[in-house]
Amino acid sequence: GAGVSQSPRYKVAKRGQDVALRCDPISGHVSLFWYQQALGQGPEFLTYFQNEAQLDKSGLPSDRFFAERPEGSVSTLKIQRTQQEDSAVYLCASSLARYLPPYEQYFGPGTRLTVT
Amino acid sequence: AQSVSQHNHHVILSEAASLELGCNYSYGGTVNLFWYVQYPGQHLQLLLKYFSGDPLVKGIKGFEAEFIKSKFSFNLRKPSVQWSDTAEYFCAVKWSGYALNFGKGTSLLVTP
C-alpha cells in the first residue's frame, strides 16, 4: 500500500496494562510523527523522528509514554501502565523530509485506544 | 504559547450555500499553514497549504484559503458546498519546530 498504516486499529486495555501501537510510514519517508487526538479535539503532537533519531519528544505527556524507530522505518509507541486519560486516537504521520518543502505530513488511520 | 483557534465548532449548511471557516493563530514568526479534512470513517487528508507567495491558495475539491498576515488568519472558503463536503475540518500551523499545531476542528454538516 502507498499510505501510512497503523495497527491495531482498535485497542481496549484495562487500566494498568501496557500497550504497543505500530506505525508503518510511507516507504522512503524520513520523518515520522506521533500525535494524540482526544475526543472532540484536534491532534496534539507527541514526538518526532528523523530516520531512527528521536529529535523531539516534548509532547509525550509522561514517562509512561515511550516511542522508538530503531531502523528508521517502522515505529512503535508504547504506553506503560495505561490510565483512563490515555484513551484517545493515536495518529502516526510521515513526510519525505523536514528541511525541504512542502513539509506535507501524510496521516495514517489511527489507533483508537480505550482504557477501561 | 503558540495556539491555533477555529471559531466555529459546528456548522450546518444547505447544499449550494457558501462556506467560510475561520482560523487564527498566535504570533510566532514565519508560519506554514494547512487545512486538513477528515471525511467520516477516513483518515486526515491535506486540503491545501500555504508556504509563501500568493496569499490566496487553491486546494482540492474547489476549496481555497486566504492568508492574511496582518490578521494572523487563514480562513477556508468554498463558494458552493456539496453533501459530500460533510466532514471535520482542521486548521494547522507549523512554526519553526517540527510539529503541526492543530485547531480543535470544525464539524461541517451539509444537508441536501
Image (cartoon, rainbow, N blue to C red):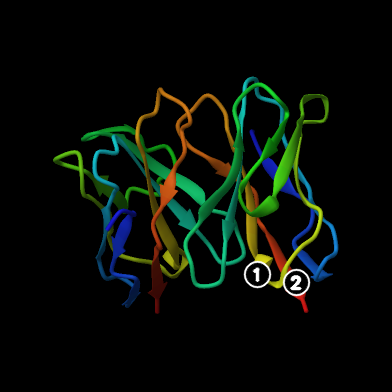
Q: Which residue is mark 2?
A: B110
What chain is tagged by disc 2? B
Which quarter of the picture shows residue A114?
Answer: bottom left
Determine whether A49 is above or below B109 in the image. Answer: above
Residue type highlighted by circle 1? Ser
* Earlier-in-chain disc, 2 versus 1: 1
Residue at 27% across / 47% down in the picture?
A67
Question: Any mark on residue A88, and which?
Answer: none
> Are the residues under badges 2 and 1 in a single subunit?
yes
Tell me the crowding category of disc 2: few under 14, some 14 to 19, or many 20 or more residues within 10 angstroms, Cα based.
some
Whole-percent x, y for residue B103 in the image: 65, 49
Q: Is residue B62 above or below residue A114?
A: above
Left or right of residue B91, residue B65 in this image: right
Asked which quadrant contains residue B4, the reply is top right
Residue matched to label 1? B84
Q: What subunit carries mark 1?
A: B
Residue A55 position within the rendered picture, expressed as x and y whole percent measured from the top left: 32, 30
Q: Residue furthest left?
A: A71
Tell me if A74 is positioned left or right of B100 in this view. Answer: left
Residue at point 34% right, 54% down? A3
SS of the residue under disc 1: helix
Q: Is residue A116 above or below residue B22?
A: below
| Residue at the image position 24 percent from the left and 44 percent from the top | A27
Instruction: Tell me the kind of residue under disc 2.
Output: Val
- Of tags 2 and 1, the one toward the viewer is 1
Q: How many marks?
A: 2
Q: CA distance from mark 2 to mark 1?
A: 8 Å
Quadrant (top left/top right/bottom left/bottom right) for the C terminus of chain B: bottom right
